[in-house]
Amino acid sequence: MSEQDPNARLRPDLDEEMNVAETHAVFEGATAATIRERRLHENGMEPVPLWLFLCAGISLLVGGAVLGKGGALFNYGQDSMWANEWTEDTSGGPEEITEGEVLPFFVKQGAKTYGKCAGCHGADGKGDGANYPPLAGSEWVTGENTEALGMIILNGLSGPIEVAGKTWNSVMPAQGPISAKDLAPLMTYLRNGLNDVGDVVTVEMAQKAVDAYEARGPGKTVTAAELQGGHMNLLSGEAMDPTTIIDFETYQPVGNAGGN
Ligand code: HEC
């Protein structure tokens, strides 16, 4: 269009840069300034270019990675809300439980040591009905004779023995040495996992059994007759209420730093 023609912009049909909004403005009798303003505004409404989309996408990825790594860029420090959430995630597991009631804990721990016995007496403690006598329902396990029970376990047993109305006559190899800390939960498991006696064999009591085993000397199995001749007693030591809260490290009542 010609510079000389002052009416050029008033003839939209001749305008190469024909623009609908501008044209309307011209017909509305708008001033040149208004037209320019509208054109600028219209430029702002242009579709977002592809490069801007790419930049936004990259920013999201980079930003996400930085935050996801725990805030290398945004270091909020120890007392920030995010930092606390982060540490809570790793600290709140069941492994954190360090104390609880003695009976269920001993039964759980004793069940692990019972793996030594399960091959012969069965996982359920019912024996096999032929070569290995039952521990579930056995008066040797449930009776007030933990001393004899401890000796059978640690020293082994040979010769005839009556269990739940049936006579067995075989040999059980010695299972000692077993530490008092393992023997207490094992005996508690025999009496409360395989049976339902309701009492706890403490580490202190189990230590008495270990002492007797060591004094007697390994390699000498006991017989039922020998046990019945003077060992049908409870292992000595202070009884522990089954609901006593103990420390899962020391196996001692919580707050009893001295131990037994
Ligand atoms: C190699 C097989 C074997 C293993 C392992 C074994 N026992 Fe025995 N156990 C026997 C036999 C056989 C007898 C019967 C012995 C006899 O007739 O004199 C017996 C008897 C007993 C008795 C007395 C009788 C009864 O049934 O109550 C107890 C208690 C006992 N075992 C507990 C245990 C415990 C606890 C363990 C694991 C620490 C264990 N045994 C591991 C074979 C085994």
Image: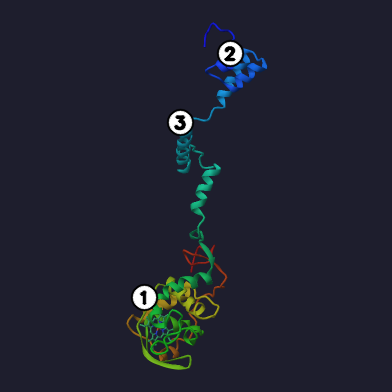
* 147 vs 140, nearest the viewer: 140
Please, what is the three-letter code of the amino acid marked with disc 2?
A: Arg
Between circles 3 and 2, the one closer to the viewer is 2
Q: Identify the element where label 1 is drawn.
A: loop
Residue 111 screen position, x and y as percent: 45, 74
Find the distance from the CA under tag 3 to the CA under tag 1.
76 Å
Q: Is residue 9 above or below residue 96?
A: above
* Category of crowding for the residue at label 2, using alpha-carbon neighbours closer than 10 angstroms: few (below 14), some (14–19), many (at least 20): some
Q: Identify the element where label 3 is drawn.
A: helix
**Image quarter of residue 149:** bottom left
Q: Residue at x 53, y 7 (%)?
A: 3
Disc 1 target residue: 177
Find the distance from the CA under tag 3 to the CA under tag 2.
34 Å
Q: Which mark is residue 9?
A: 2
Disc 3 target residue: 51
Please, what is the three-letter code of the amino acid marked with disc 3?
A: Trp
Res 151 visible? no
Res 169 visible? yes
Taking the image in four quarters, ligand 1 sits in the one at bottom left
The coloring applied to the image is rainbow
Q: Earlier in the sequence, mark 3 or mark 1?
A: 3
